[in-house]
Amino acid sequence: MEKYYGSRDDVVLLLNVPLYGTKQAANCFYTSLRKSASKRNYKRSRADPCLYYIWTDGRLALFATWVDDIIVFGHPQDVDTIEKNLKEAFVCKSEGELKEYVGSKIDVMRKSNGLATIKITQPVLIQKLEDEFDVSTGKAPGTPARPGEVLSKLHGGELLTSAAATNYRSGTATLMFIMQWSRPDIFNATRGCARHMSAPGTVHNDALYWLIHYVISTRNRGLVLEPDRVWNGSSKFKFRIGGRADSNYAANEDDRRSVSGGRVRLEGCPVTFRSATQRFVTLSVTEAEGAAGNMVAQDMMYLYRSLTEIGLSVELPMVLEMDNSGAVDLANSYSVGGRTRHVDVRLYYLRELKEEGLLVIKHIPGENNDADIFTKNTDARTFERHIPSFVGKDEYMVEGEEDVKKPRRVRFANGS
């Protein structure tokens, strides 16, 4: 532009073709793909606008888009048809059988009974962490964070230098991407580090290095999807959805907000898992647990809509489990009084789902609630009891290991 117009600031150029990498380019491709799919009788899911499907002779075929990366599922004949249609509409390249997608390595192990186990790892990003952070010294930690550790803001404590703070943000951002796709075991520890990216201190940096050391030392660990049953291909097959929720009441000392955690399983496979600081202050453990239950119920409803939208069936009612009797009782009744009079919309959402027959809320003992690892940094014994349901049994499991570290809460005040 400077070659032809110099330093003038009153000139705007109109692009005839969107440049790759811009928002306009992504939207332009999405619009073209949607129109092309519609012409070929593919239907777009109303639950997820990036998911397309088609039923052919009783067979379901799907394809999902991540900008211009497309993943296709279905009978080999249907997959070939979708691939042919895409090549007719766009200049594209087939990568063959799914082994990697959006930076994730995907290993599929098939069994003789028709079931398969899928393991998702991200070795490239873990290698990136190893190259950028020196954690070669010391014994590898057995948990993502020190048991009981809760990171708080620095109040007069020692802040990191500008360069160290940039390094902290870079490492935390990489871990945030890893936790979403392949490492549910680091979700809560990463959430804790991410809350302090604006003003990290030495204590936060120590927690980050602990977490990175754990991730590097368990580089082969990843999300494992192992369904309980084989789908028979029928639209009348009743898929099973189950969720569990937990909370850590008033965990954050800075604003006393609680932490919500939960996961949703489809046929025994963890398909969504979350750890999030609640956006409001709850006044009791029961209210905090109810808020966590609402979060998981929303994820369950999204999965329910995703399945029913493409013509599949779901077994009702879906089961939501919580380990707080008060929250379970409130969701299953209409009692009002005491410290629960102010709990309005969030509570009525669960009650409405229950009345419609979509959801049933049940109590589960705390020691059996695997959502616990999404709300707090647990001791090694608790951690290893719950993570096999997310990452399977791997070479890093140490059965019967005693946790010798005492829980501690980290808070810097007045430089102390």
Image (cartoon, rainbow, N blue to C red):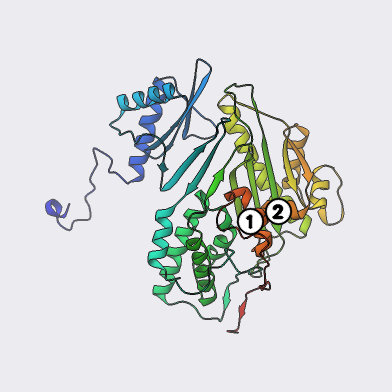
- Kindly state the secondary structure of the residue where label 2 is placed: strand
Q: In which quarter of the image is residue 115?
A: top right
Q: Using the rendered view, name the quadrant where residue 87 is placed.
A: top left
- Check disc 1: other Cα within 10 Å, few if <14, some if 14-19, many if 20+: many
- Measuring from the top left, give residue 182's x and y in whole percent: 51, 50
Query: Residue tagged by mark 1?
Result: 374
Labels in figure, total: 2
| Residue 14 percent across, percent down from the top left | 24, 42
In the picture of the structure, the residue carrying the numbered disc 2 is 246
Q: Looking at the image, is 305 positioned above or below residue 362? A: above
Residue 375 seen? no
Horizontal side, residue 39 vs residue 305: left or right: left
Which amino acid type is marked by label 2? Asp
First in sequence, mark 1 or 2: give its number: 2
| Residue at 41 percent of width and 56 percent of height | 125
Figure check: 81 above or below 193: above
- Nearest the viewer among 396 and 97 is 396
Residue at screen point 47% across, 27% down = 74
Q: Residue 113, how many percent across, how many down?
A: 58, 30
Q: Residue at x 64, y 58 (%)?
A: 384
Whether tag 1 and tag 2 are in contact, CB under 8 A, the answer is: yes
Residue 109 can be seen in this image: yes
SS assignment at label 1: helix
Q: Distance between the residues labelled 1 and 2?
A: 8 Å
Residue 174 placed where, x, y %? 45, 58
Left or right of 337? Residue 241 is left
What's the amino acid at mark 1? Phe
